[in-house]
Amino acid sequence: MTVDQPMFSVLGPLEVRLPGASPRLGGPKPRMLLATLLLHAGHTVGGGELAEVLWPDRPPRSTAANLRTYASALRAELGRTPARIRAVGAGYAIELPPQELDLLLFEERVTAARECRARGRPDEAAELLARALALWQGVPLADLPGSPLWDRRLDRLAQARLRAAEDLVELRMAAGEYGEAAGELRALLADHPFREDLWRRLMLALHWSGRQGEALHAFTAIREQLVNELGIEPGPELRRAHEAVLAGEPPPRPPAPPGFPAAPALAAAPGSPGAAWSPGESCSPAGPPDPSAAPVAGRALVVPRQLPPDLVDFTGRAAEVAALSRALAPGGVAVVTGPPGVGKTALAVRCAHAVREAYPHGQLFLSLGGTAPPDGAAGSPAGPGELLAEALRALGAAEPLPPTVHERAALYRTLLAERPMLVVLDDAAGAAQVRPLLPGGASAVVVTGRRRITELPGAARIDLDVLPQAEGLRLLTAIVGAERLRREPEEAAAIVRACGRLPLAIRVAGARLAARPGWSPAVLRRRLDDETARLTELRAGDLEVRESFDRSYRLLPDDAARAFRALGLLGTRPLPGWVVDAVLDRHRSDDVTDVLVDANLLRPVGTDPLGQPRYRLPDLLRVDARDKAGEVDMPALARVLAGWTAAAEHATARLPTTVFRLASPAARRWRLPEDALRRVAADPVSWFGAEHETLVEAVRLAAQAGLAGAAWGLAAALVPYFDLRCHLGVWEETHHVALEAARSAGDRAGEAAMLRGLGQVALYRDRYAQAAGMFRRSRVIFRTLGDVRGEAVSVCGLGAVGQFRGDPAAASRHFRRALGMFVSLDDRSGEAYARQALGRTCLSTGDLTGAADWLGGALRMARELGDAHREGCVSLQMGRLHDLAGETGRAMRAQGRALTIFEGFGDRHCAAYAMQGLGGLQAARGDWRHGSARLESSLAIFRQLGDRSGEAATRRLLGELHRSSGRRALARGYLRAVTSRRTGEFP
């Protein structure tokens, strides 16, 4: 198969060419689905848009199922081709090499032709244009019913074809190939019979190819056509061409050197016969220079006024407007960057109008096409040579222009040195594209672009973000009207939030409301609430948020595009940089992160307490990234969750409260970079503090993705931190989410682990019956699975329930059973806990000898294990033992030791119990002032952490203290607040 016969064709009837038998594409609807995807190759077409194409009158209820059926059938038929149809959210996309689709090949060749022309290679440019136009086989998709949703794309294609044909004619005539140019022109006139400029060129081409009679006949034909059908005479340019043919004028002489006076035939005054062949239609090599000529001889002075109109409803940005206006002083250069749709051009135009009076020689506005859609007319960023040519023509420079970028830039600077102007360079691709367009001198320049451009020395940089909520509301109000929004202010605010406060999205939402006077704001708000359809809703006429995002996305390298899609699956929380490593399954992916940051698709949001840079996708870009993600991106999500699991377990292993930790054998682990692991290990509590909200969201994401092992593994890894900080609410939330995921997946180990954790939360909240039920169910499952340690941990929970319910016999029975299991497993940490628990049970019954035995053994084991936190917990109970034995001094030393250990770990919860015990001992010795202060401190911590039983016990001690000191009213206040029956024995 040759390149000139691509496998897929839409520039004519829809065709798929394969060796051997042609694929069976089915009826009209599968063919229209394929045609729609090919028209938007490489981009996602939403399910709603596809439904409008296939069922323009009324989509069936089974739309999604029908689309899946058609897509599946097409995949089967196209299996031998390099094309891949993939599902992206509710929509679909087709991916294939550009050379296998005539539309993409056409655009590629047109772009290459323009580059050749800009580099002074007109013959190559003409050959490329001819091959591009040869791909057209008639009206695009003429064999299909068509759709209004195709119109914009097809209109752009038609314009691109016309411009390519005109460019080819221009090159033919510049090369003296007048006969070939005449043939091209006749073909164009068949489609555009009233284009006088085409008729003028045809007359001159015929005349200069020696066919004067045909040229005069052409004038007669167009004149009769204009008079008879439109009632008008030919225009002045066509009449001047007629006079040139009658006078027998020869073709134009070789053009003068670039920048010098044109030859007489090219630079004649308007109205003279020599003006029949207009400048710009020759690319011939330059002749010998004429040093005596002036740069713009023969031309009237041109004062360009090219600024687009200012937006009448421009809103906010006061600080940015002031900064940019200051930067546009003579000689100033400013760069405005920001994500797509943030209003960069609007700001630049607003400020350009504000300062334009300071530049009376004119204002230039050049569109650099840094993110132009691939429609053939602007398939890639415009080259500096092409842009300089546009600027020089606007400045009235003589044709032909200098052939090289260097010479054009020199002439451009020369002209602007004499006449300083304001120059707006919109939609820049990068610094390399901009540098030749900087005039220097007293001209001012403002550059806009999506990519961060920091390489221009001395340039003021203004980085735009989304609008503040209040300014977003003002913009919506300016578009829709104050009266309409005043009736539903909360709905209006919700619309702005759903738009991510992005100016383009707010403008589109406002336009939709303005076009639908019967809608209340609540109608649009409800439609925007569904994130899966939000970007489909944010489209009005030629304003479309998704299309704006697509222009940035398609410029990304493959790795950056993969990372962007995967980040969209990771929720709303800011993320550390290593997440991109996990997405790409390699370390040191900072280069990819930098690409996304420089493209303004990923926002740095500072550094966390551990020194990690953090990033987040802006709200609507996150929605777009998630919509673009498909099955191919799910392994990346799984790796990120595996990274969070590994990091959380790495941190948990260094926390003090790990005796009941349960791990998920089914959860994957992905090892973080060593520097990240070092940060985690150095300060695990601070790491959890920085990440725990992100980890909670990761549990939900894992559950939603059906990754039950990751969901409950993460939830379980969070328990020691939640226990340490008494975060009972999120502990319960994550465990409920993971429990449902485990049950849905039939993961019995996960179900047991989550029931065990939920039982602990219920215990802390004094819901003893609920706690006992969960502990019993988890125990049964662990026993069924043969997980002895899991069963022992559940039995410990039953022992704690017995203890807090005032049933020491049951508590002792459970703790002894758990102790036996821990001993059989040689789990010395579990054994130390069980011994401590048995000692505490003995204390509750007054068995001081038994308590001393159990607690002494637990203390020895804790010290042997180096488990300082367990030593603190045992010391707390030893303090109670010594107190009951009347050994107040030893009791205070033990409680003080416990307090020192807990404060060293930053464990405020256990420290509060140590304060409680120490304060009670001090008060008992008559040191009421210090004892009361300790008790008040512990009370404040219990209240802050939501420990109701600890709070009740401390209030009871304070009440008794004040009552014994004669402050009865104060005592009654404390005792009245005591509602809990728990003993307050936590550690």
Image (spheres, rainbow, N blue to C red):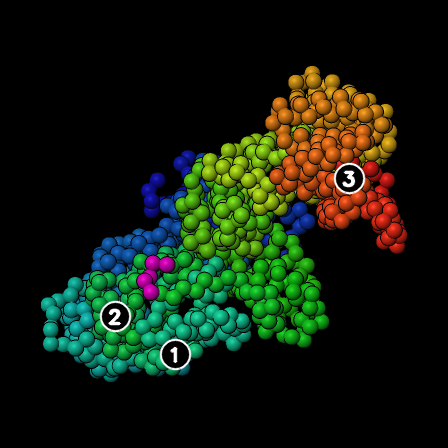
Tag 3: residue type? Leu
Q: Which residue is mark 3?
A: 921
Q: State the count of labels.
A: 3
Q: Is residue 323 above or below residue 130?
A: below
Q: For the point 68% across and 64% down, which residue is it?
A: 491
**Residue 356 numbered mark, or none:** 1
Sort mark 1 into few (<14), some (14-19) or many (20+) by Cα contacts within 10 Å.
some
**Residue 931 numbered mark, or none:** none
Q: For the point 61% across and 35% down, which residue is it?
A: 655
Spatial CA distance of label 3 from label 1 is: 81 Å
Q: Is residue 743 above or below residue 283?
A: above
Q: Which residue is mark 2?
A: 412
Q: Nearer the viewer, residue 513 or 238?
A: 513
Q: Is residue 88 visible?
A: no
Q: Where is residue 967 drawn, in percent x and y?
A: 86, 53
Tag 1: residue type? Arg
Name which of mark 3 and mark 1 comes first in the sequence. Answer: 1
Range of residues picked out in magenta:
454-458
Spatial CA distance of label 2 from label 1 is: 20 Å
Decide if residue 619 is on the left or right side of residue 834: left
Q: Secondary structure at mark 3?
A: helix
Tag 2: residue type? Tyr
